[in-house]
Amino acid sequence: VDKDYKNIKIIGFDADDTLWINETYFYEAKVSIMGLLSHYASPAKIDQELVRMELQNLSTYGYGIKGFILSMVEMAITVSKSRVSNKIIDKIIQIGKQMHHQPIELLENVERVLTLLSKKYKLILATKGDLLDQQRKLKKSGLRHYFQHIEILSDKKEENYKQLLEHLNLNPQHFLMIGNSLKSDVLPPTQINAQAIHIPFPITWNHEKVKEPKKSDKKYKTLTNLEATLELLI
Amino acid sequence: VDKDYKNIKIIGFDADDTLWINETYFYEAKVSIMGLLSHYASPAKIDQELVRMELQNLSTYGYGIKGFILSMVEMAITVSKSRVSNKIIDKIIQIGKQMHHQPIELLENVERVLTLLSKKYKLILATKGDLLDQQRKLKKSGLRHYFQHIEILSDKKEENYKQLLEHLNLNPQHFLMIGNSLKSDVLPPTQINAQAIHIPFPITWNHEKVKEPKKSDKKYKTLTNLEATLELLI
């Protein structure tokens, strides 16, 4: 075990884009909707308007598919200057319904990594988003039994991690978080003196984008895939 | 203390329409939307179509405002035979946003009842719905400190109550649930040998409507308001 991790007792995993593909489905939905609205605006204009709408609505809707689709409908009305057809609005809503029922596609080697780590550490899942949707994805993933605790959070800020560790009755120095989002999975845990490993996913949602800290201030490791954690942790 | 409740150690409270007003806001939103669509269909027709749409979408969207609004937009397209204007669709979406930011209106004597019961019992909150929205309402309510545990569930069936009691490490005979929904707060707990008290709210969402059991099979008490629990429990 790498010396940085010798105190670790509990490992927290993010779910979306850490254990299974998620952002890809949002990206594909966005591309489909850009196609539906191509008569009214360019993809760049649609993307810009959507980002604006999502950020504006985030504190109201929170994370998840339903808020995304409501923002999509609002954006369609705006970019079309209130001329988008009922047919297209209905298609956007149906794309949202399909997103809820996407199959779960695990990332590479997830089961092998969880099997090996669960022999040595207590594993928990800490994910944010829509309660029903996250529960449904976890069930479909077949990964439930690896985790001794599941926490579905409405957000993943320092405060949320503090509460989680209190609930687990755990000193931060015994906790390691692994995830794809610098903003949600990596920076907040390191700010409360827990450890974190960053495993970037090829697509990052706009709202999750933050600047990497300067090298000298960096308090976490970045790995290219989940399997690489084994070398450090086992 | 009434002899039925002498073993009770933990009391679970439902939140929406038990501690504060909720269904009224959905009802008012529905009435506004009926007004917006009066050109296309009668209130009765709209109501019928909405109930159909909500039930059809429930397993996809779950409970909460966002799913309700998405069903409303879909219903508007259907009842108008795809002729509803962008302006009306946008108004429906804005009604949904306002619903997220409604003030919290506590039901009568809630604080007094919680104060007295919390001196004698451990109180927990067990509510279903949207994670962010329920957390926001609880914060606004100012009631957070009465509860030693908060559980936001995606559904309230026997299975969910079993898991909750396991999590609390509690024998069902020591648990009493208090709520306004026969279907979600009262019947499931009694089916797993916990106790329940039913306090009906004047409006019940269609999906929550179930038949009362025959008098001889009835395993719970029905009270007209929260204050009446004090006589039985203190």
Image: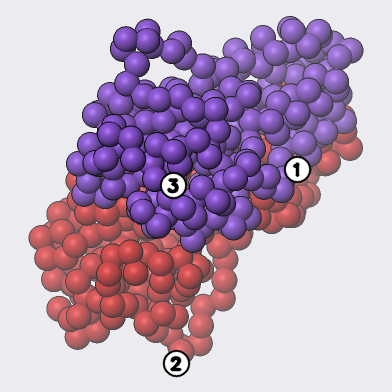
Chain colours: A red, B purple
Name the residue nearer the viewer: A32 or A10: A10
Task: Name the residue that disc number 1 marks.
Answer: B98
Calculate the distance from the C-alpha at mark 3 to the C-alpha at mark 1. 25 Å
Percent position of residue B172, x then y: 23, 37
Q: Which of marks 2 and 1 is in front?
A: 1
**Placement of A142 over or under B32, stated as above or below:** below
For disc 3, the chain is B
Quadrant location of the C terminus of chain B in the rendered image: top left
Do marks 2 and 1 share a chain? Answer: no
What is the number of the mark on residue B125? 3
Residue A147 makes an appearance in the image = no
Disc ID at residue A216: 2
In the rendered image, the vertical position of residue B201 relative to residue A197, given as above or below: above
Both marks 3 and 1 on one chain: yes
Chain of the residue under label 1 = B
The single residue placed furthest to the bottom in the displayed view is A216
| Residue plotted at (44% across, 80% down) | A191
**Residue type marked 1:** Gln
